[in-house]
Image (cartoon, rainbow, N blue to C red):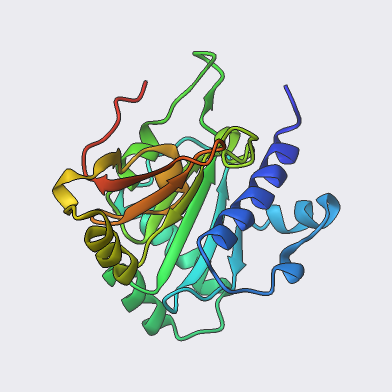
């Protein structure tokens, strides 16, 4: 199996690309580090990524254990790690964290269970419904799912574009096809309920899909 640190490095590169595709404004050159530089930061367990999208600050945490991140203990542990590295007010960060606003935590963890010789995605599942916390398996994040020649192009429409869509095609939200909220593509772009994607397939055909709360059946 490939060196796990190298897999985490690939996941770091793809995570930055994911944030870029989500339209986060940042000095991406600053975070384009080589593998040796990454290893030094990776050992610190959590990496602060200064980006701007709806005034959010982003923290990327690498975890080598498959613990449940839904417990209060884990949240407090993560918050404490952030506060140690943040130059901002502790009280301000605490308020942001508890309100789930303007602070985004992306956890990338190793889901491989050596004993059972399989990957486990149960820790990804619970985070789908949360606004402030996202959890990805490192082996999935190490592969950029949108960089395939036959992968359609997904564009999240803004409210004005959605209104124009309804008017142009004389349709309504209820008549548009759907995409599950935990669909890997939707998780990549962090689409929320009510969002609409414009999908351009390689042959040029255009489709639209609305994000619904229904979840795909995923293997445990």
User: Residue 39 location, x and y as percent?
Assistant: 77, 51
Residue 45 in sight: no
Residue located 29% across and 69% down the image: 159
Front residue (pair 116, 139): 139
Residue located 33% across and 72% down the image: 101
User: Residue 19 location, x and y as percent?
Assistant: 55, 60
User: Residue 133 location, x and y as percent?
Assistant: 39, 56
Front residue (pair 129, 62): 129
Number of labelled discs?
A: 0
User: Which quadrant holds residue 75?
Assistant: bottom left
Q: Is residue 41 above or below residue 115?
A: below
User: Residue 167 location, x and y as percent?
Assistant: 23, 63
Q: Is 152 on the left-hand or right-hand side of 161?
A: right
User: Which quadrant holds residue 99?
Assistant: bottom left
Front residue (pair 57, 217): 217
Q: Quadrant of the C terminus?
A: top left
Residue located 35% across and 69% down the image: 97
Residue 71 in sight: yes
State the residue lying farthest toward the bottom.
89
Q: Is 102 on the left-hand or right-hand side of 12?
A: left
Q: Is 41 on the left-hand or right-hand side of 174?
A: right
Front residue (pair 179, 114): 179
Residue located 72% across and 59% down the image: 41
Q: Quadrant of the N terminus?
A: top right
């Amino acid at each position: 199996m490939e060196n796990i640190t190298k897999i985490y490095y690939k996941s770091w590169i793809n995570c930055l690309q994911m944030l870029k595709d989500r339209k986060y404004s940042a000095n991406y050159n600053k975070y384009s580090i080589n593998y040796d530089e990454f290893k030094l930061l990776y050992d610190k367990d959590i990496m602060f990524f200064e980006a701007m999208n709806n005034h959010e600050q982003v923290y990327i945490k690498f975890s080598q254990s498959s613990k449940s991140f839904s417990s209060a203990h884990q949240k407090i542990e993560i918050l404490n790690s952030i506060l140690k590295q943040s130059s901002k007010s502790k009280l301000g960060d605490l308020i942001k964290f508890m309100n789930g606003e303007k602070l985004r935590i992306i956890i990338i963890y190793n889901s491989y269970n050596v004993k059972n010789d399989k990957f486990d995605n149960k820790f990804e599942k619970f985070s789908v419904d949360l606004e402030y916390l996202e959890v990805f398996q490192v082996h999935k994040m190490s592969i950029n799912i949108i960089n395939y020649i036959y992968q359609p192009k997904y564009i999240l429409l803004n409210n004005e574009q959605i209104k124009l869509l309804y008017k142009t095609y004389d349709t309504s939200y209820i008549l548009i096809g759907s995409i599950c909220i935990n669909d890997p593509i939707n998780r990549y772009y962090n689409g929320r309920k009510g969002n609409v994607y414009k999908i351009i397939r390689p042959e040029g055909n255009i489709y639209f899909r609305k994000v619904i709360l229904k979840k795909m059946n995923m293997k445990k």
